[in-house]
Image (spheres, rainbow, N blue to C red):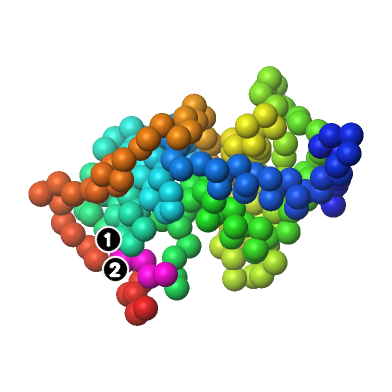
Amino acid sequence: MGIFYLNSQEIITADNYLSLVGDRYSSIRDYEARIVIRSGNSDMYGTLSYLTPSFLRIDFTSPANQVIVFNGEMLTVYLPEYRAALNQGISSSSRRGGAGGASLATPQGLVLLRRNYVPSFLTGPEPVPLESGSSERVVKLRLTRRSVSEGFREILLDINPDTRLIRRIEGRTIADSVVRFDFSGVAVNTGIPEQRFVYDSPASANLYNDFLFRDTD
């Protein structure tokens, strides 16, 4: 596991660095960001809103009008292409975040990462280009799962070294497929109201409840 000096007095390991990122997110009440989700050759674009402790919403521009909302108790996914609204109650015992990998960029998500994955520096402790030819520089961490029960067998985190905010999450699944989440234009503590996470599906939508599992908490 790589180490480096945060300043002349302190040596930082990859685990310590991930803890510092967690501390940064713990200081955030709310944030908004542009998000791009890439799965295979498909890209989805939208705006993500987060409000502590566990409110999360993504309003997509592509696919147009698609929405994912998690209000701490209910996950709703609206799929305009199928005129379908999928609802799933989430109990405290089964709660793992409301919008898949995007929920890792929250205080709760980072706690789960530290608990369930072993971090190391990917190429070294110093900031490197986000990708080949990019002028944007990030600290790259590789997280390896501690248990086979985790959905991602490996996660790569790209961290902005100045803000300690997550720039990119890339997860490799058990089936060896890759899902990537890019965050940009992050605006922190702007006063997002809880009302933003109240979502009423269009009247024309067909409702499907417990589409993931039946909650028995």
Q: Nearer the viewer, residue 9 or 147?
A: 9
Q: How far apart in space, not on screen, are marks 1 and 2 (Cα)? A: 6 Å
Q: Which mark is residue 210?
A: 2
- From this view, report whether residue 208 is shown above or below residue 202: below
- From this view, report whether residue 111 is shown above or below residue 40: below
Q: Report whether 139 appears left or right of 12.
A: left
Q: Position of residue 9 (x, y in %)?
A: 89, 39
Q: Residues within 10 Å of mark 1 (few under 14, many from 20)?
A: some
The residue labelled by disc 1 is: 87
SS state under label 2:
loop
Q: Which mark is residue 172?
A: none
Tell me the quarter of the picture where residue 115 sits.
Answer: bottom right
Q: In the rendered image, which quarter contains the C terminus?
A: bottom left
Q: Which residues are magenta?
A: 87-92
Marked residue nearer the N-terminal end (1 or 2): 1
Badge count: 2
- Asked if the stretch drawn in magenta spans residue 88, the answer is yes
